[in-house]
Amino acid sequence: MQLVDFTTVSTQAVFYRLALVFALSFVIIIIGARLIGSERKARWFKRRTNYTFFNRRGVFGEYLNFGYPRTWQGLLAALIMYGIIFGIGVWYILIHPYA
């Protein structure tokens, strides 16, 4: 496994890869939310109880909001999602060769 030599890579190419990994992270979170389901998500994660003007979310934001893991299943689900996002990001940005 050899890391990419960034001296020959344009800033624009790195930005496009970062943006793609960012978009893929939303897809992974949406897939995780659908696989877990709202009932298990409510059991496994603790959500915020008091909302202010600054931390209020819309419908889509609430769907993506998991909260803090409160059970081992929630911790495992969070670690799996973080691991997939981190693994894809490291591979695609640092290891996969730029064309």
Image (cartoon, rainbow, N blue to C red):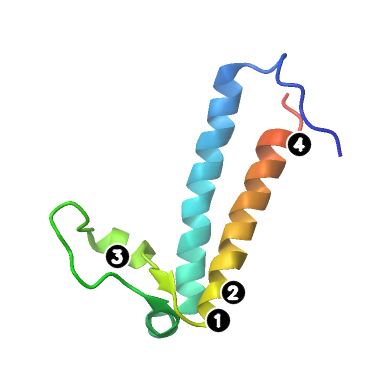
Given residues 30 and 62, the one toward you in this image is 62
User: Which is more foreground, mark 2 or mark 4?
Assistant: 2
- Residue lying at 34% horizontally and 66% vertically, measured from the top left: 63
Mark 2 or mark 3, which has the lower sequence index?
3
What residue is shown at x 44% (from left), y 84% (from top)?
A: 40
* Helix, strand or loop for disc 1: helix
On the image, the x and y values in percent for residue 59 come to 24, 63
Seen at 66% across and 48% down, the residue is 88
Label 2: which secondary element:
helix
Label at residue 95: 4
| Residue 73, label in figure | 1
Is the residue 59 above or below the residue 18 in the image? below
The amino acid on which the numbered mark 1 sits, given as a three-letter code, is Gln
1 and 2 marks in contact (CB < 8 Å): yes
Position in image of residue 14 (x %, y %)? 59, 26
Q: Indicate whether 99 appears above or below 46.
A: above
